[in-house]
Image (cartoon, grey):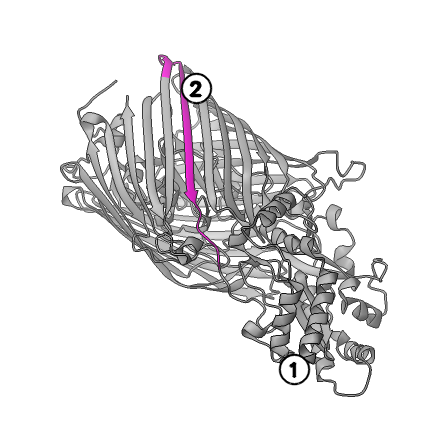
């Protein structure tokens, strides 16, 4: 139906988005272009959420904290996308590894792979299987198809499993029966204004880059009330944010020889790759020992920062009768992007596709889906930097040339520091230079070599196969004529998931006995289920719910997660909630089964089937580094007439007791116990003011983390077991050839506690002005027996948002403003540790609706003041993005 007249609002929703009460409209075209209803006097209290309890329930009476964005909220946001708008919600943290890849987290212990936070689309997990988390929104809805966003910022494992121990997001799309027609959206913008990291800026050129996103949606009811179809497509092109942190991670690497800063021959800049610890050698020069690193390359030399995403989805919906619907959805995405785990990666020609079948009835909900992943021509930036250097000249030859040049320079009277610079120039003579044809050719060659000791390819193919069903037992009994009290609820569900990996020989092999490591697919499965019982008492003023979930993963015993909740509502507008629950996170594919040669360090999964014997016979790298530093210091301080070999052996004997046996062992699931209280209320006779407050306390144990541990070995490469003489072990570990280096997935031995809370206040003023403020407090409380392997908390203690918006401030002209500030925090990742500075951003938008033309214009900017910031160490520097979005809809 085509209409050129604004449609009057027919119902009202209020959202947990920061700006407060938001009214929806029935007609889909009105969601695009209709001005706001500025005459509404109160709120509708019937807004519902689904994610909190896996069934529809009152938003006000949800037993756990839930944040929600509805359609009008999404139109009002000044963020360039609905995914970016999530950062404005209370209790939510978003970090930015790439312009096209943002990571959602809540309540601390954030990292760049989202492994503790589940992300669903219409209840379907959209993770990349081998990563164990989603790649931003590349397999998610378009701006035209998103209907609502629900966020549960807290443990959700009792109902969802899915490793959702920090929370989950569920993106709800538009049903074609309810929203049919054609809509088109073009968003064009610019970023990188005055960005010093864009190289053309230094050459006198312009740094600005174009951003473009084109989306199309078409939905049609083919048979009235029976059959409907929808199709979506999105194409995004942009120039990514650049990571160029040149902070030296090894500033004291040559402290015993008084070489610091620019004189240090073993620097390790954060975003320079190929000069890390495994790329250093200890050279004896002039009777002293120096740590010397290969030169490496900046990230900007190794990455094409042009990113793109081409994604599409198609869905076919069939209604058997009202309330009973079967839907098949196919999603596909191909993209180029930047991703970060322990290292940063260029994702190139990456492919994800998903088939999903969902059945919804009043009694049963069931879904099955298959996700397929292919990493295409993706590659590891660290390995690329290392192996471009090594393919030009092997380490041994480079060290020989460096030594000869250093000796020659000193012989001519050069000071030590200058001799090191001269030696590097000589050893690097003929080195491949970024931007040249030879460099680009070599980069392309190494991109195809699937061994990180020689090349840099990330070649992974993996599938995720999932099936689940949920039965409303209480509803089934009532429909069957059983006299079940109306105040009782009973819900049950079961699910099964299998990951299937095609071994590539580098990243994954099949380690299971009796299977071919390189030809037999690796399977990793989980089966689980839950039972939830609840009741409403005291004239519906008290609601109690108890849930018990069980999960059984391959390689682990069954685990049980209980959840108890209570909601007390003395009036429909006043609601107190309390909940206690536990959750488990099982190791991801990468954590359990990785098998990577990475910079002369073997990174292996922590399951016994992958790392049998390594834990028992290895020594902690931290102790080995301290031991070798002490040996070097002792040698450099020894002024006796002893030979170099004698000095070395004396230093080894003096310091060998510093070596620490690896105390860690094979992987176990992570565990969390969480307690939460909250209060949600509407105030005033007209119900214009909404308050939502929550507080939580969590305890964690068995954090899944990485430890570096080296197995001593003979000159022939045979491992030395722990029964060997300590001096023999120490002598081996003092030489690079005497170490078999491993990075192992294991569990921290600490018990960790954190607590926090959030508060949101939203008010609808006269004339449709929406004011909001929220704040989030998140704190690491204490660690018992801290062993240094606790995952980084990586969360600001304080963050807040302030907002003001109006969809129709004057003659169809609207606006939205959001100011966000977050406190500085200490960041710990495997790439780099240090302080992330505090930052603030102002997002703004101005909109204009043209109802007669079915057009809506939106001119906006994120980080409008263009203050560059980093959301975590090692990540890119993020500046302003300025855009114009034009949405056209015909229904």
Question: Toward which corner of the image does residue 544 lie, by quadrant?
Answer: top left
In this view, which residue lies farthest toward the bottom? 640
Q: Position of residue 12 (x, y in %)?
A: 24, 34
Q: Nearer the viewer, residue 92 or 543?
A: 92
Q: Secondary structure at mark 1?
A: loop
- Front label number (1 vs 2): 1
What distance separates the C-alpha of mark 1 from that of mark 2? 82 Å
The quadrant the C terminus occupies is top left
* Residue farthest toward the front in the current orientation of the protein: 412
Return the residue nearer the eye: 92 or 506. Answer: 506
- Point out the stretch of residues depicted in magenta: 221-244
Does the residue at mark 1 contact the one at mark 2 (Cβ under 8 Å)? no
Where residue 821 appears, x then y in whole percent?
34, 58
Residue 169 lies left or right of residue 436; in this view the side is left
Residue labelled with disc 2: 317
Is residue 235 highlighted in magenta?
Answer: yes
Query: At which x and y percent is residue 126?
Result: 51, 36
Q: Quadrant of residue 620?
A: bottom right
Please determine whether, in this image, residue 330 is positioned above or below residue 868: above
- Helix, strand or loop for the magenta stretch, by majority: strand
> Does residue 526 show up?
no
Element under disc 2: strand
In this view, which residue lies farthest toward the top? Answer: 223
User: Which residue is at the front of the view, 864 or 298?
Assistant: 298
Q: Is residue 835 left or right of residue 682?
A: right
Q: Disc 1 designates what residue?
A: 413
* Residue visible at 58% across and 74% down in the picture: 263
Left-right relation of 288 to 360: right
């Amino acid at each position: 139906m085509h209409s050129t007249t604004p449609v009057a609002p027919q119902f009202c929703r209020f959202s947990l988005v920061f700006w407060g009460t938001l009214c929806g409209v029935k007609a889909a075209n009105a969601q695009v272009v209709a001005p706001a209803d500025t005459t509404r006097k109160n709120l509708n209290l019937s807004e519902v959420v689904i994610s909190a309890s896996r069934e529809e329930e009152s938003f006000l009476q949800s037993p756990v904290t839930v944040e929600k964005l509805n359609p009008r909220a999404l139109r009002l946001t000044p963020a360039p996308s609905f995914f970016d708008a999530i950062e404005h919600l209370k209790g939510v943290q978003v970090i930015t590894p790439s312009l096209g890849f943002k990571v959602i987290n809540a309540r601390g212990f954030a990292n760049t792979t989202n492994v503790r936070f589940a992300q669903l689309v219409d209840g379907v997990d959209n993770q990349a299987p081998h990563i164990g988390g989603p790649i931003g929104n590349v397999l998610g809805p378009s701006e035209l198809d998103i209907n609502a966003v629900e966020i549960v910022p807290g443990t959700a494992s009792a109902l969802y499993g899915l490793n959702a121990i920090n929370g989950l997001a569920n993106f709800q799309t538009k049903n074609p029966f309810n929203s049919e027609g054609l809509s088109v959206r073009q968003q064009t913008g610019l970023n990188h204004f005055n960005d010093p990291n864009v190289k053309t800026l230094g050459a006198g050129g312009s740094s600005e880059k174009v951003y473009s996103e084109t989306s199309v949606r078409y939905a049609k009811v083919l048979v009235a009330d029976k059959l409907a179809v929808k199709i979506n497509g999105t194409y995004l092109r942009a120039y990514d944010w650049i990571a160029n942190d040149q902070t030296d991670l090894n500033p004291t690497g040559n402290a015993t020889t008084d070489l610091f800063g620019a004189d240090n021959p073993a620097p390790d800049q954060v975003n320079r790759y190929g000069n890390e610890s495994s790329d250093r050698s200890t050279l004896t020069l002039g009777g002293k020992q120096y740590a010397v690193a290969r030169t490496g390359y900046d990230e900007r030399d190794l990455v094409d920062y042009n990113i793109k995403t081409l994604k599409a989805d198609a869905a076919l919906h069939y209604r058997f009768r009202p309330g009973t619907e079967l839907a098949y959805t196919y999603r596909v995405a191909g993209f180029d992007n930047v991703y970060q785990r322990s290292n940063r990666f260029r994702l190139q020609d990456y492919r994800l596709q998903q088939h999903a079948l969902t059945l919804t009835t009043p009694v049963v909900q069931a879904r099955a889906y298959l996700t397929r992943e292919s990493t295409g021509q993706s590659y590891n930036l660290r390995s690329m930097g290392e192996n471009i250097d090594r393919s030009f000249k092997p380490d041994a030859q480079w060290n020989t040339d460096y030594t000869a040049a250093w000796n020659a320079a000193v012989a001519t009277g050069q000071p030590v520091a200058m001799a090191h610079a001269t030696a590097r120039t000589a050893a690097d003579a003929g080195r491949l230079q970024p931007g040249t044809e030879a460099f680009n050719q070599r980069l392309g060659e190494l991109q195809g070599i699937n061994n990180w000791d020689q090349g840099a390819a990330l070649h992974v193919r993996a599938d995720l196969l999932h099936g689940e069903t949920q039965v409303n037992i209480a509803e089934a009994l009532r429909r069957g004529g059983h006299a079940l009290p109306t105040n009782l609820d009973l819900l049950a569900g079961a699910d099964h998931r299998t990951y299937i990996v095609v071994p590539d020989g580098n990243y994954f092999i099949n380690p299971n006995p009796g299977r071919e490591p390189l030809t037999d697919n690796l399977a990793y499965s989980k089966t689980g289920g839950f039972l939830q019982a609840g009741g409403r008492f005291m004239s519906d003023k008290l609601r109690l719910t108890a849930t018990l979930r069980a999960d059984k993963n391959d390689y682990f015993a069954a685990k049980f997660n209980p959840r108890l909740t209570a909601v007390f509502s003395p009036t429909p507008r006043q609601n107190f909630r309390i909940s206690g629950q536990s959750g488990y996170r099982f190791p991801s594919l990468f954590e359990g089964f990785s098998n990577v040669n990475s910079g002369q360090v073997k990174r292996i999964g922590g399951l016994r089937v992958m790392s049998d014997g390594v834990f028992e016979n290895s020594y902690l790298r931290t102790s080995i580094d301290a031991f070798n530093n002490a040996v070097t210091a002792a040698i450099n301080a020894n002024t006796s007439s002893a030979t170099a070999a004698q000095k070395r052996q004396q230093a080894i004997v003096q310091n060998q007791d510093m070596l620490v046996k690896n105390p860690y062992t094979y992987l176990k699931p992570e565990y969390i116990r969480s307690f939460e209280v909250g209060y949600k209320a509407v105030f005033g006779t007209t119900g214009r003011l909404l308050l939502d407050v929550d507080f939580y306390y969590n305890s964690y144990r068995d954090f899944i983390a990485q430890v570096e541990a080296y197995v001593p070995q003979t000159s022939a490469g045979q491992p030395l077991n722990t029964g060997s003489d300590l001096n023999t072990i120490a002598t081996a570990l003092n030489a690079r050839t005497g170490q078999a280096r491993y990075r192992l997935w294991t569990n921290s031995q600490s018990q960790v506690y954190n607590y926090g809370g959030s508060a949101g206040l939203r008010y609808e003023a006269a004339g449709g002005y929406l004011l909001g403020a929220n704040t989030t407090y998140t704190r690491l409380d204490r660690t018992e027996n801290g062993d240094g392997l606790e995952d980084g908390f990586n969360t600001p203690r304080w963050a807040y948002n302030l907002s003001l918006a109006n969809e129709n401030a004057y003659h169809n002209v609207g606006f939205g403003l959001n100011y966000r500030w977050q406190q500085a925090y200490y960041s710990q990742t495997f790439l780099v540790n240090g302080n992330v500075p505090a930052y603030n951003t102002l997002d703004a938008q101005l909109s204009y609706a043209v109802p007669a033309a079915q057009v809506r214009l939106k001119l906006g900017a994120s980080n409008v003041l263009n203050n560059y910031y980093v959301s975590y160490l090692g990540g890119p520097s993020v500046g302003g993005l300025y855009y114009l979005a034009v949405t056209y809809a015909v229904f």
